[in-house]
Amino acid sequence: MEKIRIAMVGAGETATPLLEQLLAASFIEVIGVAELDMALPGVAIARAAGVPVTDNFIELAEQGERVDIIIDLTGSRKVREDLRRFMQFAGNAHTVIMHERISLLMLSLSSGKLIQTKHDSLAY
């Protein structure tokens, strides 16, 4: 594996600093970003880096084994359930769905302090 191929669902407050770190890492390829609000700063950052942006997160999941990790940063139970259902239906045993709580752990470790999220429930 030359690079870890990542897709992100969500480009808001939590996602933006993580996206910046992912884009800066030479061993990561950001395959795409899905976000409903195209006015968010994370969308602009992705576009400036040449990363495809969509408002349909299933388009990222449809890429199958081209994506190693889908990072779900939406805080939405429906998005999580739809992603899991799609992956099972498609038979994609390659791609891992990474929960927002793991992203918060990674961001907290890199900043040296606990990062908070605005999402109320991070149940998976």
Image: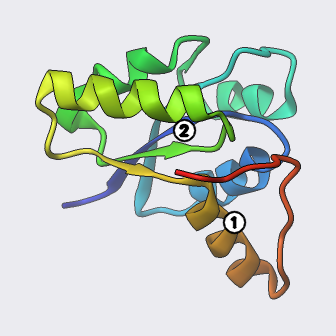
Q: Amino acid at mark 2?
A: Met
Amino acid type of the residue that numbered disc 1 sits on in the rendered structure: Leu
Q: Quadrant of residue 92?
A: top left
How far across and down, in percent of the image, does residue 119 sit? 81, 46
Q: Nearer the viewer, residue 66 or 118?
A: 118
Residue of label 2? 8
Above-or-below relation of 107 to 61? below
Asked which secondary structure carries label 1, the reply is helix
11 to 57, vertically: above or below: below
Element at badge 2?
strand
Q: Answer yes or no: is residue 51 visible.
A: no
Query: x%, y% of residue 106?
Result: 62, 72
Q: Is residue 80 left or right of residue 38?
A: left
Which sits in the foreground, 10 or 121?
121
Q: Residue at x 67, y 24 (%)?
A: 47
What residue is at 71 percent from the left and 70 percent from the top? 107
